[in-house]
Image: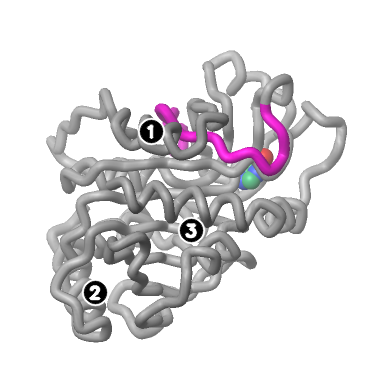
Amino acid sequence: MSKDAFALAREAADALRARASVDSFDVALVMGSGWVPAADALGSPVAELTFAELPGFAPPAVEGHAGQVRVLEVSGRRALVFLGRTHLYEGRGVDAVAHPVRTALAAGVGTVVLTNAAGGLRPEHQKVGDPVLIADHLNLSGANPLSGASFLDLTEAYSGRLRALAKEVDPTLSEGVYAALRGPSYETPAEIRMLRTLGADMVGMSTVLETIAARQGGADVLGVSLVTNIAAGLAGEPLDHEEVLAAGRASAGRMGALLATVLGKL
Ligand code: HPA
């Protein structure tokens, strides 16, 4: 992590404030693959910027990631909604991955909601289309947004208070451990068996580095995975990115309503 990364985040935050004519924001949401329809369900934006207009942001490489930031008033909270994220596998480095979260923190946000699409490792009690709260993570990405002697406690990386709030809104929500690999290849069946043995419940290629960056900045994190497929080798079918996006579209209404109600309780 370089000093420059934080200066760039402050520049982007200033650009957001100027465009939205707002001094400070309450909450940021990062919408993962398949979550764009859920963002639409949050309501109409008061301002909308493309990543190209913001310092340090690059257009997303992945289909299903729109590359926009929306400013919304959701349930009385000023929200920054990032449609799309940078993944480590895009090769732009950890600072690019952490940049939206650092920008949000520089813009005053104290709560970060990180969403993603994930493979389900427990088909015995997870269905495609189920949201699962992230209770903890395994960072197997090989990277970390912190460097030097930036020791950081991650005992409660994902806020217990925010998970309890989400469960008040939807008592059927379950919790799980999210394992992040670098990707972009999906896992082999042997890797999936390994992850199950390690105690993971979901697998994906994002979120954990953003969580670490948010915790470093003192923000509370709510993580939600949408199980878009059963992980490799467990369902006897090959994985397909289009399937991931379709699961998002199918669950959009439920996800949008869940997020909006949780925001109202912050
Ligand atoms: N593996 C890794 N990342 C994913 C998956 C998966 O099965 N599904 C959605 N993102």
Is label 1 in contact with label 2 (beta carbons under 8 Å)? no
Residue 256 falls left or right of residue 11: right
Q: Is residue 192 visible?
A: no
Q: Amino acid at mark 3?
A: Met
**What segment carries the magenta color?**
126-141
- Disc 1 from disc 2: Cα separation: 29 Å
Towards the viewer: 12 or 223: 223
SS at mark 3 in the image = strand
Mark linked to residue 163: 1
Mark linked to residue 31: 3
The residue at the point 77 percent across, 45 percent down is 239
Quarter occupied by residue 33: bottom right
First in sequence: mark 2 vs mark 3: 2
Residue 11 spot, x, y in % from top left:
18, 75
Which mark's residue is nearer the viewer, 1 or 2? 1
Which mark's residue is nearer the viewer, 2 or 3? 3
SS at mark 2 in the image = helix
Q: Main secondary structure of the magenta part?
A: strand
The residue at the point 26 percent across, 47 percent down is 214
Pointer 1: residues within 10 angstroms few (<14), some, or many (20+)? many
Q: Is residue 165 visible?
A: yes
Mark linked to residue 38: none
The residue at the point 54 percent across, 72 percent down is 66
Residue 252 spot, x, y in % from top left:
62, 57
Mark linked to residue 12: 2
